[in-house]
Amino acid sequence: MTAIRRIVDLRHLLSSPVLDQGQRPTCLALATSQVHQASRGSSPLAPDAIVAAVVRSRGTIDGGMYTADVATALLNTGQPELSVWPLQTGLGEVSTPPPNCTNYPWYRADLKNHSLHHVLDDALDDGELAVICIELTEDFYQTDGSDTPVDADSQLCNGYPRHAVVCVGRGVTPQGDDVYLVRNSWGSHWGAGGEAWLTYDYVRQHCYEVNRISRVLPEP
């Protein structure tokens, strides 16, 4: 297939490598951290600061995390840099920061969620990354990250697993179809170095929420 023409490519806003959540249900915290970092133009931020705040609030993250909980943690608690609080790789839940972590700056932000797909295009046009919460299809799991984008399921089914990724760009196929570039949190072995294209139909059919940073605190 002829290469996709990139219309918007915002990957330069991320200085962090592709993250790997392992078996932990922390995709929303990882995606939000990257969008937060890009919004303030900072070094990579610590997702486990969000995870710990949610664990302290809810008692557990079994079954995944909710946008409302992540938004509250980001606004009220915030995050230090990733170098101060490295990403946990094991399965255990974390609820307290590493020693001396509170001696470093913590950064807060206001995360707003939207259910309308056009908000994604608005974010990209404004030069901003967005978190998109999506349903996972078999093709999403199996993509090799080539210029053949992951398309929507032809037959809808119930019980799709849910996941959060970062939308980092938009492009157009040789046929003139819109596609979106996403960065996942399954390490660099998924897709093309941790990234893949989704069709417009995939986003329209399987995306149920778009999250944007509306402001960062303190103001840079």
Image (cartoon, grey):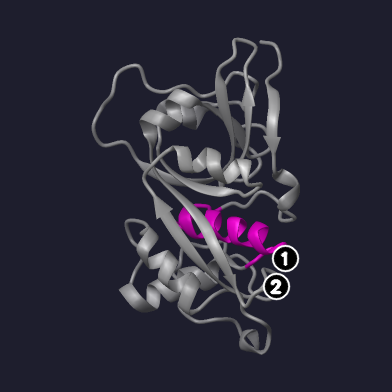
Q: Residues within 10 Å of mark 2 (few under 14, many from 20)?
A: few
Q: Is 16 part of what is drawn in magenta?
A: no
Q: Position of residue 8 (x, y in %)?
A: 68, 35
Q: Residues within 10 Å of mark 1 (few under 14, many from 20)?
A: some
Task: Identify which residue, 177 or 48, lies in the foreground.
Answer: 177
Q: Is residue 76 visible?
A: yes
Mark 1 belongs to which amino acid?
A: Ser
Number of numbered labels in the structure image = 2
Q: Residue at x 63, y 74 (%)?
A: 85
How far apart are the two marked residues, 1 and 2, measured between alpha carbons? 9 Å
Callout 2 secondary element: loop
Task: Report which residue position mark 1 lands on.
Answer: 42
The stretch of residues the image draws in magenta is 21-45
Q: Position of residue 73 (x, y in %)?
A: 45, 72
Residue 79 sits above or below residue 8 on the image: below
Callout 1 secondary element: loop
Quarter location, residue 115: top left
Q: Is 37 part of what is drawn in magenta?
A: yes
Task: Report which residue position mark 2 lands on.
Answer: 220
Tell me: 107 left or right of 5. left
Mark 2 belongs to which amino acid?
A: Pro
Quarter location, residue 125: top right
Q: Residue at x 62, y 78 (%)?
A: 218
